[in-house]
Amino acid sequence: MELTYEKCGDYLIPNLLPSREPEGELRKFGRMRRQYLKEHRSGIYSGLLLIGKLKEHLLAVQEQAEQRFDVLIEQMAAAEGVTEQLKAADQMLWVRKMNNIRARAEEVVLAELIYHL
């Protein structure tokens, strides 16, 4: 490892450059995972931050969480008979059922992926 230094007054300061972060935007589940690690698993958070792997980890967890969320919604809606026909017949009932399904799916994703090591 080669280090270069910059003279600042009487001191030599190392020129440290952080590694490139992966491309991608942190959305809901990625931000929730970051907050959980920061507040409850500060050692893991600091370790990932120091080695430059935090955003990579957050993006991976986010992708898994979003996929799991979508699959759970589809499965729960099919199991409970929430279809387009129901939506056409009674929109308010369809909205109530879908909101309930989304809330339950989010709870499962949070327990399985976000708040778990």
Image: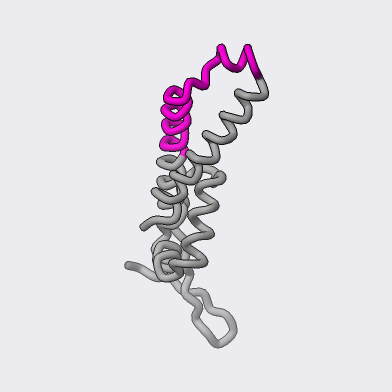
**Colouring rule applied to residues:** one colour
Q: Quadrant of the N terminus?
A: bottom left
Residue 45 appears in which quarter of the rendering? Answer: bottom left
| Nearer to the camera, 21 or 97 | 97
Looking at the image, residue 39 lies above or below residue 91: below
State whether the magenta stretch is mostly helix, strand or loop: helix
Q: Residue at x 48, y 69 (%)?
A: 15
> Which x, y percent locates residue 61?
42, 47
Looking at the image, residue 37 lies above or below residue 72: below
**Does residue 49 show up magenta in the picture?**
no
Looking at the image, residue 105 lies above or below residue 40: above
Q: Residue at x 41, y 45 (%)?
A: 60
Q: Is residue 12 visible?
A: yes
> Which x, y percent locates residue 111?
43, 51
Q: Residue at x 40, y 41 (%)?
A: 64
Q: Is residue 20 visible?
A: no
Looking at the image, residue 21 lies above or below residue 105: below
> Number of marks in the image?
0
Q: Quadrant of the C terminus?
A: bottom left
**Does residue 67 show up magenta in the picture?**
yes
| Nearer to the camera, 34 or 89 | 89
Give the extent of the magenta segment: 66-90
